[in-house]
Amino acid sequence: MSFFKVEQLGIRFGGVVAVNDVSFEVNRGEVFTIIGPNGAGKTTIFNLVGLIYPPTSGRIEFEGRELTGMAPHRVAEFGIARTFQNIELFEHASVLQNLLIGRHRHRATSLWQELLFLPSVRRREIEAREAVEKVIDFLELAKYRDSLVAGLPYGVRKVVELGRALATEPKLLLLDEPSSGLNPEETDDMAFWIEDIKKLLGITVLMVEHDMNLVSRVSDRVLALNMGEVIAEGTAAEVQSHPAVIEAYLGGAVK
Amino acid sequence: MGLPYWAMILFAIASMAIVGMVAERIVLRPVLGYPAFTVVMITIGLGYVLRGVVTMVPGWGTETYALRTPFSEGILKLGDVVLAVQQLAVIGMTALLCFVLYLFFRFSRIGIAMQATSQNQLAAYYMGIPVRRVNMMIWGLSAAVAAFAGILLAPVTFVHSNMGFIGLKAFPAAVVGGFGSVPGSIVGGLIIGLVEALAGFYLPEGFKDVAAYVVVLVVLLVWPSGIFGETVRKKV
Ligand SMILES: Nc1ncnc2c1ncn2[C@@H]1O[C@H](COP(=O)(O)OP(=O)(O)OP(=O)(O)O)[C@@H](O)[C@H]1O
Ligand SMILES: [Mg+2]
């Protein structure tokens, strides 16, 4: 049984075929990266995995269970978390509150228990807080703990979003362009974190990324996409030197 | 209907909660994900339609009704100050309602999920929050709170189909206090109420009606996001 599998996935938006017949498998514990020029369909694949869009064709399987067709909020319950290309945070809440919402699915207390202030409620809250503090330590967010997200610099917001995803304790983490908008130093931190997420936390990472330095550094395997279709798959070096990939990027540059 | 006051309150609140949820399901679910302005316009339109329908019902129509409460008539004397027991009861119940809502949004899992959903639906999905169901509960809760507010207001203004327009006064109160802050809207409401009452007493005729808006202007000049609003400076 494969850990995560996408089979002949396809979606059309009106006349646009955004993703066409895409199949790949991600093994437990690896960093699997999808590259491709703008508009290749990378984010759309994430939206399909996140069940935001229903696919026109194909299926998605996670730990042997089919995801496609389920309600989108159940993705988290399966142990899949995500960050977004254009940061999607709870803007009017503090960093701590954002991370605590990441614990939502683990706080299985009912309103009645909460109204009665049962000890189990208190225990869950302490558990949530402890889990979140670990993430704060891991990502060095301590000094922003009580800051309002809306006022933070872009680079920090990006890390907060990663933290919120980690707070859900995922088995599979989807990162949509984790380095976009970051300066070289922040990108370097991000690379370290992705390595640690894989090695220390044992979380499998499925990533979309443009920065080929970062891709080569952290990826076990790479998949190249162009105009919604898979054009190459292999190690970072193999994919980068693949004629179809060079062609796709040059073609994009000429346009 | 011949039910006792308390039973009637519960009945009204429960039925309005259901009305709110049905309205969400039928009228608002189709625009899930659209900008807030769309939702605002739809609810304003829905309000007009419902008021229109109510005035057409024979026997309800455009009449004004009095609502008898267990508190009616009594008067409390504190030295020179004379207070109507009924109004004290209304103030007390309002304070209680605010306190309960504050606790609900601050501490309960579902209250926090409601806030998350209202701030970012997409992100809420990935936190495992059933966004559609939560939205329906938000509308149910809003309608229930509105019903409760209506019941509290009834002894003061009487019951008629346009009593909802007092909500227009709530808008400056929310702006002054800072949108999205429960303590803020209470303080905002008190400020607006006091200024209005004082303007009505000390200033010439007509000033009472614009007083609220003058307060809004002044407050926004000093605190652009309201007194309790979060201060966020956008980087340019
Ligand atoms: N909701 C949608 N409605 C219509 N077209 C869409 C939608 N989402 C994506 N598309 C189209 O699908 C194609 C792939 O878009 P996608 O966002 O997946 O690209 P991408 O590979 O993530 O690109 P980038 O590197 O710029 O982020 C584009 O042509 C885009 O316009
Ligand atoms: Mg993209």
Image (cartoon, coloured by chain):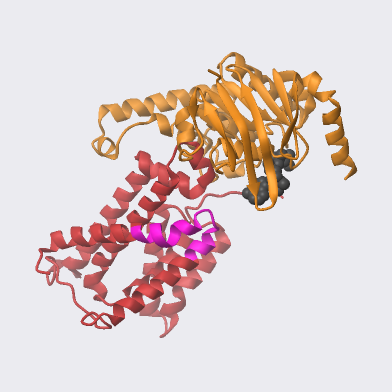
Chain colours: A orange, B red
Corner quadrant of residue B5: bottom left
**Left/right of residue B43 with respect to residue A34 in the rendered view:** left
State left or right for residue B184 relative to residue A219: left
Tell me: residue A196, above or below residue A158: above
Q: How many marks?
A: 0
Image x and y of residue B116, in percent:
46, 44
In the displayed structure image, the side of residue A45 where residue B187 appears, left or right = left
B121 vs B41: above or below:
above
Q: Nearer the viewer, residue B114 or B23?
A: B23
User: Can you see residue A159?
Assistant: no
In percent of the image, x 55 and y 58: which residue is there?
A: B35
Residue B175 rendering spot, x and y as whole percentages:
48, 62
State the residue in front, B175 or B2: B2
Span shown in magenta: B22-40
- Furthest residue to the bottom? B205
Q: Is residue B26 magenta?
A: yes
Residue for point 44% across, 31% down: A77
Ligand 1 location (quadrant): top right
